[in-house]
Image: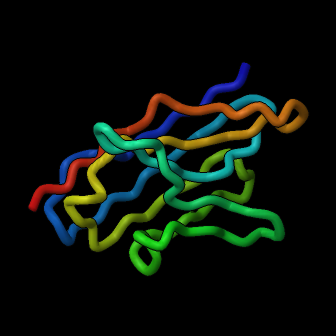
Amino acid sequence: QVQVVESGGGLVQAGGSLKLSCAASGSIRIKGWYRQAPGEQRELVASFISGGDTLYADFVKGRFTLSRDNGENTIYLQMNSLKPEDTAVYYCRGVGRNSGTNYWGRGTQVTVSS
């Protein structure tokens, strides 16, 4: 059974830091992080791409860092210099190794106060 679970969100003041974690089980490859603010569409934050590279949205470059453990079933998002506009629910996306189906966790809330 495939499962994707995010954790690490919370309330932080502007300029602060948080580290999100995403753990997956099942035949799945964890790809990266997305976020969705109220009334907005879900958007890419950071993702692993082919060749082992990472892709970052322009609005997080230099502030967020995507990493993963050696087993590739857990990934992390280190978020520094947080801004109020980073407030959103952060979701982890996985892809079935054989099916290519997208799998999403329930998300973790990040709130940045000014």
Q: Is residue 113 left or right of residue 36?
A: left
Q: Is residue 27 left or right of residue 14?
A: right
Q: Is residue 61 left or right of residue 111?
A: right
Q: Position of residue 17 (x, y in %)?
A: 29, 65
Q: Position of residue 67 (x, y in %)?
A: 59, 64
Q: Quadrant of residue 109?
A: top left
Q: Determine whether 114 is above or below 22 in the image.
A: below
Residue at 48% in and 41% down: 91
Q: Determine whether 95 is above or below 113 in the image.
A: above
Q: Quadrant of the N terminus?
A: top right
Residue at 31% in and 38% down: 39
Q: Given the current orientation, which residue lies at the most extreme bottom position?
A: 62
Residue at 53% in and 51% down: 33
Q: Position of residue 71 (x, y in %)?
A: 74, 52
Residue at 27% in and 51% down: 87
Foreground residue among 49 and 3: 49
Q: Position of residue 56 (x, y in %)?
A: 55, 68
